[in-house]
Amino acid sequence: MSRFRAIWQASLNATKKGLSSASLEITDAGKGLKGVFSGNLSLDVIPGAKWTISRSGFCGMRSRKFNGFIDLDPFDTVAMKIKGDGRCYISTIYTENWVNSPGQQEDNSWQAFVFVPKDNWYIAKIPLAQYLPTWRGSVIDAEMEMNPSRVVGMSLSVNAEGGVPGARTGPGDFKMEIDWIKGLRTQ
């Protein structure tokens, strides 16, 4: 098992003129650091915004780009100890851009859903094979393979719409607590 250490920051759809809000609070309860990612998802946009957007209602927290790479090659799963609100969140792994366009500034992104049960600590285990290649939130329909030895960052995000059946959806408050994120070998 390997624990990921990174500096995280919150992001939201305000960059696209949306009205969602989010914060990321890092606390130390004497047993180590814990993150609390919370806010409010809004489908509204700033009145009179000059940009037309097709999606609103999303927030995320993203690590700063790692200094070097995290090598997930020895692992087959990303595990997270989390407590939430019954929403479905999106786990994203960013890898060095070698799949589509080497030399571009944007890294490759690989996403998987993670359902966060309400009010109880839960260890979510996401096999690396479940992460799908994406481009700006949309799945790329192509045969691609992640290079787990060249991870440059990670993120967790939440959308007002979509996710797994039975998960809470829609605009409104959200809250997810993160105790840890680790690489895990299950086989």
Image (cartoon, rainbow, N blue to C red):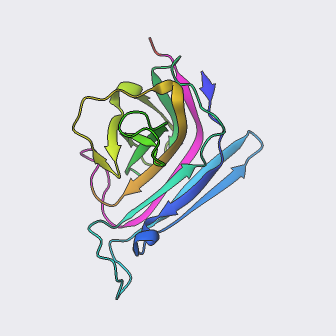
User: Foreground residue, 20 or 97?
Assistant: 97
In the picture shown, does residue 149 fall above or below 50? above
| Residue furthest left as drawn | 141
Q: Residue furthest front?
A: 103
Residue 165 lies in the magenta-colored region: yes
* Number of numbered discs: 0
Tell me which corner region of the image, top left, top right, bottom left or bottom right, holds residue 116: top left
- On the rendered image, what quadrant is the C terminus found in? top left
Where residue 51 sits in the image (x, y, percent)? 33, 77
The quadrant of the rendering that contains the N terminus is top right
Residue 38 against residue 134 in the figure, above or below: below
Q: Is residue 6 left or right of residue 57?
A: right
Residue furthest out toward the right: 30
Q: Residue at x 27, y 43 (%)?
A: 139
Image height check: is 24 above or below 51?
Answer: above
Residue placed most toward the observer, 141 or 72: 141
In the rendered image, residue 58, in percent from the top left (x then y), is placed at: 39, 61
Q: Position of residue 47 (x, y in %)?
A: 35, 87
Report if residue 153 is visible in the image: yes
Residue at 45% in and 20% down: 76
Which residue occupies 40% across, 28% down?
146
Instruction: Specify the segment rendered in magenta.
Output: 162-185
- Looking at the image, which residue is at 23% across and 34% down? 142
Q: Is residue 84 visible?
A: no
Of 132 and 141, the residue lying toward us: 141
Specify the farthest residue to the bottom.
Answer: 48
Locate residue 178, reporting x and y percent.
57, 44
Q: Is 88 a magenta residue?
A: no
Query: Quadrant of the rendered structure where residue 134 is?
Result: top left
